[in-house]
Amino acid sequence: MISRPLPLFAGASLAYGAAVRLREAAFASGFLPVRRASGICVVSVGNLRAGGSGKTPLAMFLAGAIARAGVPTALVTRGYRGSMERTGGVVSRGSGPLAGPEQAGDEAFLAAVRLPGVTVLAGGNRFASAVRAASQGLKVAILDDGFQHRHLHRDLDILLACPQDLDPATRLLPLGPLREPSSAASRAHLVGGLTEDWGQGDPGFLFSLVPECLVDFGWKPHPLDAERGARAFLLSGIARPSRFARTVRDAGFDVAGHAAFPDHHRFTASDLTRVGREARDLCASLVLTTEKDLARGFLHTGGPPLFAMRVSVRLARGSDRLASLLTRAIGDNSPLSFS
């Protein structure tokens, strides 16, 4: 194992922290402007750490729930590593993807697949996306990973965190996991998190990611019970692969092995060939990946059949407060309810 050059990382972390504090001061003084997108309610779902807090599943859950309540809704995302990250664009008008993952990015493409009735917009300029949503008559824009995107005014800031994120001793990038110091949580209107991260603690609300079904290459769902108990080899390119492995085990699968790649990794033919070979060698009857990974597009592994595990959000505590704050921010006559 190669040890990290800690003095170098510590110096980079100090420099990064100085830049973050300077940016915060610029927003606090008004030197950096905050612009409001007229005619639309902006709700941000974000976090302090670099990935792995459940923000995309929760943003999709909220967008779907608000749209089903009859409020025209957009999900606004960066479109990370897609061409629309630079140009901006419409990924879905509520009836399926209009662009592939190469253009939209994996998370925006997945949202377009998963969210009928919700407009999905991608682009690094969130203000431009919110203005585009308003121009299309949409009333709510849910920002996925928007907490650090300070240039756009938001009517409700939802922060997802774990106890470590809120500890002042936790380090900033690259020495630690945080993009902002724990004190930045004071900007949030509501703090929530994953039940498994909090144990006995209780922020404003808690939720879980619950296995729902398996999906194949064509996004066709398959019941979990048909494969439950099978020996599975895992393939992932996400921020917290251990959480995926735990979810698979909790769903009743026997985990034979796990090929864990960096977050947003684009799998090559050689990657998949190696995974197929390892899965066969370990006598796995299927390969399981995440929907976000599947959204990047796959070649066949040459091994056991491949499925993605779909998870859904289940609110555990604080759902009434979350619904109340959303209803107040949206200002719609029909109050939301998650019960």
Image (cartoon, rainbow, N blue to C red):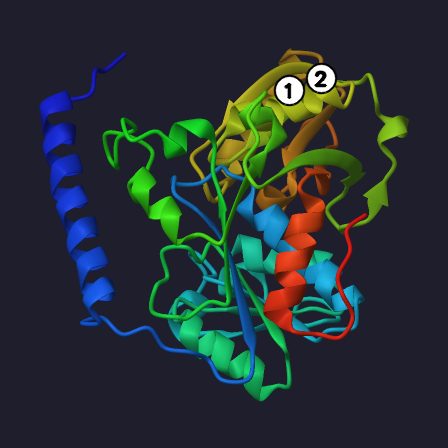
Which quadrant holds residue 39?
bottom right
Residue at the (78%, 56%) spot, across then down: 337
How dense is the environment of label 1, judged by Cα within 10 Å: few (below 14), some, or many (20 and up)?
many
Give the total number of marks visible in the rendering: 2
**Element under disc 1:** helix
**Element under disc 2:** loop
User: Which numbered tag is attached to residue 1?
Assistant: none
- Dot 2 amino acid type: Ala
Q: CA distance from mark 2 to mark 1?
A: 5 Å
Residue where numbered disc 1 is placed: 279
Q: Nearer the viewer, residue 128 or 42?
A: 42
Q: In x, y percent, where is residue 286?
A: 74, 25
Residue 333, placed above or below residue 276: below
Marked residue nearer the N-terminal end (2 or 1): 1
Q: In x, y percent, where is residue 105?
A: 51, 58
Left of 208 or right of it: where is 228?
Answer: right
Residue at the (39%, 45%) spot, across then down: 185
Can residue 39 be seen? yes
Residue where numbered disc 2 is placed: 284
Q: Nearer the viewer, residue 94 or 283?
A: 94
Q: In x, y percent, where is residue 218?
A: 76, 51
Can residue 92 be seen? no
- Dot 1 amino acid type: Ala
Residue at the (84%, 22%) spot, across then down: 228
In the rendered view of the protein, which quadrant contains the N terminus?
Answer: top left
Q: In x, y percent, where is residue 236?
A: 55, 33
Q: Nearer the viewer, residue 145 or 41?
A: 41
Asked whether the beta carbons under mark 2 and mark 1 sit within 8 Å of each other, the answer is yes
